[in-house]
Amino acid sequence: MKVVQTFRRNNDFRRLYARGKSFVHPLLVLYVMKNNRGLKRIGITVSTKVGNAVVRNRCKRILREAFRLLEPEIPAGWDFVLVARTKTAASTMPAVKNVLSAQLKKAGIIG
C-alpha cells in the first residue's frame, strides 16, 4: 500500500474545505485536517482561472513534486488539499516547495 493516497471523490474535498484549517499564501492555499486512518492523503486542485490545460497540469506537477519532497518530514494521519493560485503557474518548483514548507510549519505539522 502507498504511504500517500490521493483524494478522488468530491465529498472528500468538500469535507476538508468545510472542516479543515486553511493557510493562505499568494502561491497556494493549504487545507489540513487530522484523519483517523493513519495515512497521509492529498488532493490537488487547480481552477480554470489559472490557465489552460497545459498550465493547470504544470501547476499540478509542481505541487505534487513539492509535496513529494517534503513528504518524509510529514507524520501520518493528516489530510491535505493544495489549491494552486494564478501565481503558481509563473513560479518555480523550489519556490513552491519553500512556501509549502512554511505553510506546513505554520500549521504545526512539521518542525
Image: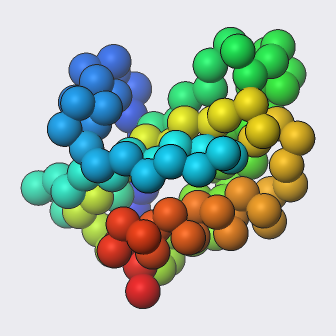
Q: Is residue 16 visible?
A: yes
Residue placed furthest toward the left: 36
Instruction: Tell me where residue 93 appears, x and y as whole percent.
Output: 80, 57
* Residue beneath the point at 70% across and 15% down: 49
Task: Classify residue 14 as left or right of residue 24.
Answer: left
Residue depicted at x 34% and y 57%: 40
Q: Which of 53 and 50 is in front in this view?
A: 50
User: Where is residue 92, by image quadrant?
Assistant: bottom right
Direction from residue 106 to residue 84 in the image, left or right? right
Model colouring:
rainbow
What residue do we see at 85% from left, 49% from top? 91
Identify the residue at horizontal 66%, vertical 45% (top origin): 26
The answer to whether 86 appears left or right of 64 in the picture is right
The answer to whether 58 is drawn above or below residue 30 in the figure is above
Counting from the top left corner in percent of width and height, residue 19 is at 19, 38
Residue 79 seen from this side = no
Q: In which quarter of the image is the N terminus?
A: bottom left
In this image, 5 relative to 50: left or right?
Answer: left
- Residue 98 place in picture, x, y as percent: 68, 69
Q: Position of residue 66 (x, y in %)?
A: 66, 59
